[in-house]
């Protein structure tokens, strides 16, 4: 049971990291567009 909880936590962390990286890429391209 504990192992399952750890896996779930890891999956949530991966999701958060992916969302963060995606938003960072979006904001980065947005700021680049503004700089032009």
Image (cartoon, helix red, strand yellow):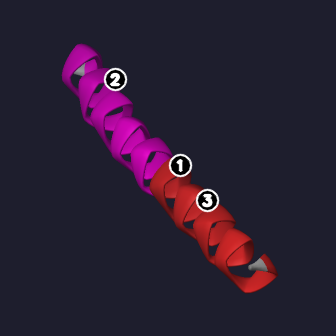
- Report if residue 22 lies within the magenta region: yes
- Magenta part mainly helix, strand or loop? helix
Secondary structure found at label 3:
helix
Question: How far across and how far down the image is residue 25, in percent?
Answer: 34, 44
Query: Which mark is on residue 36?
Result: none
Depth order, front residue of 15/35: 15
Mark 3 and mark 1 residues within 8 Å of each other at the beta carbon: yes
Q: Quadrant of residue 23?
A: top left
Crowding at mark 2 (Cα within 10 Å: few <14, some 14-19, many 20+): few
Query: Which mark is on residue 13?
Result: 3
Mark 3 and mark 2 residues within 8 Å of each other at the beta carbon: no
Q: Is residue 25 above or below residue 13?
A: above
For marks 2 and 1, give the CA distance: 22 Å
Question: How far across and how far down the image is residue 32, in percent?
Answer: 28, 30
Question: How far across and how far down the image is residue 6, in percent?
Answer: 73, 75
> Residue at the spot x=29%, y=20% of the render?
35
Question: How far across and how far down the image is residue 27, in percent?
Answer: 36, 28
- The earlier-in-sequence mark between 2 and 1 is 1
The magenta stretch is: 18-35
- Report if residue 28 lies within the magenta region: yes
> Residue at the spot x=63%, y=70% of the render?
10
The quadrant the N terminus occupies is: bottom right
Q: Is residue 25 above or below residue 11?
A: above
- The earlier-in-sequence mark between 3 and 2 is 3
> Residue at the spot x=62%, y=77% of the render?
7
Q: Is residue 33 left or right of residue 20?
A: left
For marks 3 and 1, give the CA distance: 5 Å
Farthest bottom residue in view: 3
Which residue matches tag 2? Answer: 31
Secondary structure found at label 2:
helix
Which residue matches tag 1? Answer: 16
Secondary structure found at label 1:
helix
């Amino acid at each position: 049971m504990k192992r399952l909880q750890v896996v779930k936590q890891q999956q949530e962390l991966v999701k958060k990291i992916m969302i963060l990286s995606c938003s960072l890429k979006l904001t980065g391209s947005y700021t680049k567009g503004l700089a032009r």
